[in-house]
Amino acid sequence: MDIAKYIDHTNLRAYATKEDIIKLCSEAKEYGFHAVCVNPYRVRLAKKELEGSRVKVASVIGFPLGATPTEVKVFEAEKALEDGADELDMVINIGALKDRDYEYVKRDIEAVVQIAHKRGAIVKAIIETCYLSDEEKETACRLAMEAGADFVKTSTGFGSGGAAVEDVKLMRRIVGDKLGVKAAGGIKDYETALAMIKAGANRIGASRGVEIVRRVER
């Protein structure tokens, strides 16, 4: 298995420097990762560094809490796309989901999806599983499907917990083959990444992509 093609090589640290992002992009090209995932401020730099390669640029929207108004998420998405993002990892409005304001949650996702799809970009809806009951996870996945998202994603990596095999299985069961499933948060080694893929993930978000791939090379 070419596990590198599953990986979004990620650096979303608040203190990531220009040099850190250049290194991230260099590693992504060297190992053949699917994408790099960076904060919106770094999209333009990542796009420049990856010019001429097959590596995509992903950026985050409403990150990491998901609690910004829809209009703000839309503006952030437009700017990230303008700067060269190919993929948007958007945090859903978790509080609204908890309120059972499902129409708002759906519209929130849908607004970003519409902007992205007009530019040929894809959207991954981050549901932040660590804060949700199984029933809420199922509802979030269904709302993401109804809103036209391309993926559902387990976690931001900044919550109280990260990806879990059982959550990936649940998400894949709900979305079937209609959406992708991205497992992210706390995936630090090859064995964990492989377990997520076997559970149904077809994308892995990891800041330790190099270590994961090097484990295969050994």
Image (cartoon, rainbow, N blue to C red):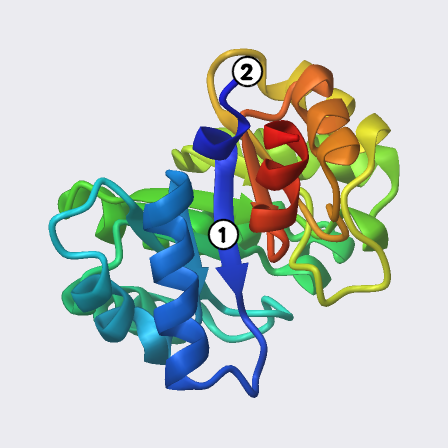
Going by the numbered disc 2, the residue's amino acid type is Met
Helix, strand or loop under label 1: strand
Quarter location, residue 58:
bottom left
Across and down, in percent, residue 211 comes to 65, 48
Along the line of sight, the residue nearer the viewer: 38 or 98: 38
Q: Which residue is mark 1?
A: 9
The residue singled out by tag 2 in the image is 1
Few, some or many residues within 10 Å of mark 2 (<14, 14–19, 20+): few
Residue type, label 1: His
Q: Residue at x 61, y 40 (%)?
A: 214
List x then y, in percent, for residue 179. Answer: 48, 24
Rendered location of residue 212, percent (x, y): 65, 41
Is residue 183 visible in the rendered image? The answer is: no
- In this rendering, would 173 be left or right of 37? right
Q: Is residue 35 visible?
A: yes
Which residue is found at the position 19% from the left and 46% from the top?
A: 53
Whether residue 47 sits left or right of residue 122 in the image: it is left
| Vertical comparison of 184 with 41: above or below | above
Q: Earlier in the sequence, mark 1 or mark 2?
A: 2
Q: Is residue 31 above or below residue 44?
A: above
